[in-house]
Image (cartoon, rainbow, N blue to C red):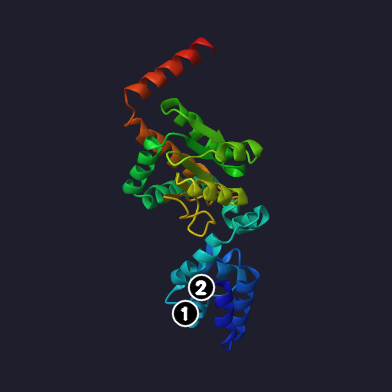
Amino acid sequence: MIDSLEKRIANKNLTKTEIVIADFFFHNKNRLYFLTSTDIAQELNISDTSVIRFVKSLGFNNFKEFKDSLKQQVSDKILTPSEKLILNEEILKNHNLMENFLECINKNIQETLNINTSKKIQKCIDILLNSKKKFVVGFKSTSGPTAFFGLRLGFILKDVITHRDNNSELIKNIIDIQENDCLFLIAHPKYSKTYNLLIELAKNANAKIIVITDKSTSPVANLGDITLFTDVRGISYFNSIISTQTLLEFLLTSLSRNIDDDGKARLASINELLNENK
C-alpha cells in the first residue's frame, strides 16, 4: 500500500503544505497507521483540516479509510524487533500504558475467538479425539505454548508427542507418522522452514493436520485440514502470545467436555502419582 500511496502522490501537483505532509508520510511509513490526523497536524504545525484535505485529494473518502488502507501493509510485513519498537513508539510514550496494554490484549483475544468459528473449533477437537498419535510441534516464540498444550493434552489423551525444539529427534519421530495420526502445528514469525517439511511428511502419510498461525499470509496457513488464526500484535518490540495461549486453553476446555471414562481415570491416576511424588 505504501508503494501505491507513493504513486498517488507522484501523480499530483502539490502545494507547499501538501509537500510538507507528503514528506512526512514518506519518512514515517512505519508510524502512519498508528497516528491520527491531529497527531500529524501537531507534529507539522499545520491544521488538522489540511491533513484530511490532502488525504481526500489522494482518493480516500476520509482519514479512517486512508488508515484502513495501510492496515494490510503493516500486518503482512514481518517486522524486526527494532521496527516494531518504532512502530509502537507513540503508544509506549503514552502515560496510560497499562490501559493501552490491556486494550491491545483484549482486542487480540476478542478477534482471535471471533475469527475461529465454533464449527472450526469442533472440527479441531474431533481430529484430536479421533487421532491415534498427536504430534504437537512449535519452535522459538511458540515453544512455551507448545509445551503447555502438549503437556495438558497428554493428561487426558494418550499418545501425545510434544516437540518444542527443531532437532533430529523431531524428524526421527515425525517420519513414522501414520494415516490415523495428526500433526498439531503452532507457527508464529519468524517461521521455520521445517514446518513445511513436517506438513509435507504428514500429507504423504495421509495424517490429519491442524495449523495455528497468525495470519492468512503465513507460509503454513491453509496447508492443513484446518487452520486456526490468532492475533499476535503487541505494543512493544515482540509479538504477543496471549491470544495463542487463550485459544489453546479454550481448545483444552472444550476437549474437557468430551473426556470419556478412560480419560477421566487417566487424569485421576496422573494426579494421584504427581501428588505422591512431589
Judge by depth and name the residue closer to the eye, 194 or 53. 194
Q: Is residue 40 left or right of residue 273?
A: right
Q: Residues within 10 Å of mark 2 (few under 14, many from 20)?
A: some
Q: Is residue 15 left or right of residue 108?
A: right
In this view of the protein, can residue 96 be seen by the observer? Answer: no
SS for tag 2? helix
Mark 1 and 2 residues: CB-CB less than 8 Å, in contact? Answer: no
Camera-near label (1 vs 2) is 1
Q: Position of residue 194 (x, y in %)?
A: 61, 48
Residue located at (48% from left, 13% from top): 273
19 w.r.t. 122: above or below: below
In this view of the protein, can residue 81 be seen by the observer? Answer: yes
273 w.r.t. 130: above or below: above
Q: Quadrant where the N terminus lies?
A: bottom right
Residue located at (61% from left, 64% from top): 30
Q: Is residue 113 left or right of residue 220?
A: left
Q: Position of residue 254 (x, y in %)?
A: 35, 36
Q: Quadrant where the C terminus lies?
A: top right
Q: Residues within 10 Å of mark 1 (few under 14, many from 20)?
A: some
Q: Position of residue 243 (x, y in %)?
A: 47, 44
Q: Residue furthest bottom?
A: 13
Under mark 2, the amino acid is: Asp
Q: CA distance from mark 1 to mark 2?
A: 13 Å
Where does label 2 land, which residue?
48
SS for tag 1? helix
81 w.r.t. 207: above or below: below
Where does label 1 land, which residue?
56
Under mark 1, the amino acid is: Lys
Judge by depth and name the residue closer to the eye, 161 or 7. 161
Q: Position of residue 138 (x, y in %)?
A: 56, 42
Q: Which quadrant of the view contains residue 7? A: bottom right
Residue located at (50% from left, 46% from top): 202
